[in-house]
Image (cartoon, rainbow, N blue to C red):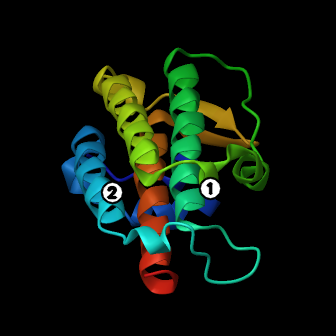
């Protein structure tokens, strides 16, 4: 896979893209992250699931559901751009999503079941894209973004949150 150009995404996402193994490619990377994420969250003690390291910070369950919601939004963006929909795509307010997601009312098992389903849908979607489609550019949150950049942003975003959980939660 060639180097992803900065013109393919909002510079805000550069750390996410850099936090991925681009040698695997998008589909293989998504599959690997699926296994890694399920293993990681499955091994967090139940007593930590609702833990937040400071007042006003998200719990571990909030973070997982945030990751799921974000993947859905970004996969939708990839679908729209892959179909050459030129409509600029709006951003979303992640904090509002977390407040209204009710993660605390869910079990870790139910969250992981949802994560697996969403990830499998994302893998299927990205498996359908050919090399040309991955290079299609659309607009999201006021910035250009390619379909392939979105794939790496999805992976890098969850890698970012795993790192935070490792540093501050467990």
Q: Secondary structure at mark 1?
A: helix
Identity of the residue drawn at 76% across and 74% down? 56
x then y, percent, for residue 72? 54, 35
* Real-space CA distance between mark 1 and mark 2, rounded to the nearest whole angstrom: 19 Å
Which circle's residue, 1 or 2, is located before the other in the chain?
2
Identity of the residue drawn at 76% across and 53% down? 99
Q: In the image, is 74 to the left or to the right of 132?
A: right
Identity of the residue drawn at 26% across and 38% down? 27
Q: How many numbered circles are shown? A: 2
x then y, percent, for residue 17? 44, 59
Identity of the residue drawn at 38% across and 32% down? 117
Q: In the image, is 134 to the left or to the right of 60?
A: left
- Residue 118: which numbered mark, if any? none
x then y, percent, for residue 164? 50, 76
The residue indicated by pointer 1 is: 104
Q: Nearer the viewer, residue 22 or 62?
A: 62
Q: Secondary structure at mark 2?
A: helix
Q: Nearer the viewer, residue 105 or 32?
A: 105
Q: In the image, is 10 to the left or to the right of 157?
A: right
Q: Nearer the viewer, residue 156 or 62?
A: 62
- Residue 37: which numbered mark, if any? 2
x then y, percent, for residue 2? 30, 48
Q: Nearer the viewer, residue 36 or 76?
A: 36
Q: Label 2 crowding class (10 Å Cα cut-off): few <14, some 14-19, many 20+? A: some
37 in relation to 69, above or below: below
108 in relation to 114, above or below: below
Mark closer to the observer (1, 2): 1
The answer to whether marks 1 and 2 mark residues whose Cβ atoms lie closer than 8 Å is: no
153 in relation to 78, above or below: below
Image quadrant in which the C terminus is located: bottom left
């Amino acid at each position: 896979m060639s180097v992803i150009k900065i013109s393919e995404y909002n510079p805000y996402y550069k750390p996410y893209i850099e936090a991925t193994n681009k040698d695997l490619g998008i589909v293989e990377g998504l599959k690997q992250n699926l296994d890694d994420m399920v293993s990681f969250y499955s091994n967090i003690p139940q007593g930590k699931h609702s833990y937040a390291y400071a007042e006003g910070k998200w719990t571990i369950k909030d973070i997982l559901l945030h990751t799921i919601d974000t993947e859905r939004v970004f996969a939708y963006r990839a679908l729209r751009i892959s179909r050459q929909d030129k409509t600029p795509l709006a951003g979303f307010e992640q904090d509002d999503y977390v407040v209204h997601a009710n993660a605390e009312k869910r079990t870790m098992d139910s969250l992981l079941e949802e994560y697996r389903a969403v990830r499998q849908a994302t893998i299927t979607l990205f498996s359908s894209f050919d090399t040309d489609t991955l290079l299609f550019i659309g607009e999201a949150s006021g910035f250009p973004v390619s379909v392939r950049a979105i794939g790496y942003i999805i992976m890098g975003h969850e890698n970012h949150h795993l790192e935070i959980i490792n540093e501050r939660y467990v």
